[in-house]
Image: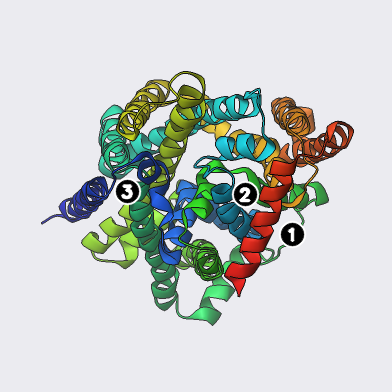
Amino acid sequence: MSDYSFQLLAIVIYMLAMIGIGWFAYKRTTNLNDYMLGGRDLGPAVTALSAGAADMSGWLLMGLPGAIYAAGLVEAWIAIGLTVGAWLNWLLVAPRLRVYTQVSKNSITIPSFLDNRLRDNTKLIRILSGIVILVFFTFYVSSGMVSGGKFFQSSFGFDYHTGLLLVAVVTVGYTLFGGFLAVSYTDFLQGLIMFLALVLVPIIGIFFTGGIGETIDSIKSVSPEHFSLFASTATAAGVISSVAWGLGYFGQPHIIVRFMAIKSVKETKQARRIGIGWMILSLVGAMGTALVGLAYFQQSGQTIDDPETIFIVMGQILFHPFIAGIMLAAILAAIMSTISSQLIVTSSALIEDMYKALFKKDASDKHYVFAGRIAVLVVAVIAAILGWNPNSSILDLVGFAWAGFGAAFGPTILLALYWRKLTNIGALAGMLAGAVVAFVWGQSDALSGMIYEIVPGFIINLVITVIVSLITFKPNKEIEAEFNETLNLLQSEKK
């Protein structure tokens, strides 16, 4: 068999495994709670790795290694910010959200939780949240499909549209039928593949570059500042903007929904340790891949056309073609895990927060599960159409969407979990303000060049929400009772 055939075989095995997991999850999905939230029965390992895989996308295996290869550890600030943000998210949000969403009328989506938590009789918060999720995640899913199309085009010479459709059909297939369980189980496997690939490449690579000492010397000969977090290219605003990416975690629906699905509060601590351990080792592996790759090419006197392909190139140099194919599957896993997670959250927003809330309130679970599957298909088709042009600018929206979700939902989620006096009017005003500021700031080259738009959006949301809530606050016995019940359950489950 040729190298090409071995690598393609690895991809086919990976794709079949995803479909198999989807079928397994389909057999275990019987009602809406199963389809949207896995019956709140996920174990800590699945919760942790599925959250991590849903989060990282192709950036972990291509974007970050490419940036470190080209500019050095000065580009690691975003990884540091994300790690701190993820740890705080597990610590502050996970336990309370798991309990509070169940106490507050068994909410199974973020918009329905905010609606129930704040007793918003107007349904405006639920509708606005659902619209924000629907719009941004449709574009986000589309950007993932574009990445999938380009992956098959660059790795195997496939036609771009063939690659896009292949990724779309497999991902939509297991998501549509298996729902949240399929997404979580496939994300768990994809997280393992990503982790193993990122750890193996730099470890094996060091043997090819002559050991740690030789590797460091080779890198320094290329750029003496390559190991510096504070290289001459670093600016205070740039460092703050990179670290500020961590603020986005509090408001990412496709990540925090995992916290709602874990089996119990006790298991969030174990899940946090697994998740942050996976994240740190994966990020270190991604950076190590770039550094070892730089040393290898310095020693061989060769060059690489695109720094973002360093992980792919090193995998093909270091391993048997079949193992190199598994390395390629790791990139595909990163892309598909994010697409599937965003699809299921978008489906939930469309059905639970818009269709069910506004039009069909008393149908059977079977009806809603069917509607959820139709929603997955419709959103996927629209996303594929938006991404049909390989030169689409949709990829530019990824950073903006992260900032938009973080600015719109982040402060609101934190205040909903920790502040008794949050009101529906305050939350609505803050969410709108945060989203608008993030949007306007992000569209201005002058402003976004100063600092990442999530910073002003997050701060404005927080300030306006607190001020308006203090003005409009009125005691509500039901809200107070739920808040106290949540605190009591947290205390009892920690014992």
Pick whichever of labels 1 and 3 is earlier in the sequence: 3
Q: Residue at 26% of width from left, 56% of height from top? A: 325
18 left or right, relative to 430: left
279 left or right, relative to 35: right
Against 350, residue 340 (above or below) is below
Farthest residue in the front direction? 477
Against 207, residue 297 (above or below) is above
Crowd tier of the residue under label 2, counting other residues whose Cα lies within 10 Å: few below 14, some 14–19, many 20 or above: many
* Residue nearer the viewer, 220 or 131: 131
Pick whichever of labels 2 and 1 is earlier in the sequence: 1
Q: Which mark is residue 396?
A: none
Farthest residue in the top direction? 359
SS state under label 1: loop
| Residue wearing tag 2 | 249
| Residue wearing tag 3 | 182
Residue 231 horizontal/vertical position (percent): 74, 59
Amino acid type indicated by mark 1? Ala
Residue 358 horizontal/vertical position (percent): 51, 20
Q: How far apart are marks 1 and 3 (CA)?
A: 44 Å
151 left or right, relative to 287: left
* Residue nearer the viewer, 284 or 118: 118
Against 412, residue 77 (above or below) is below
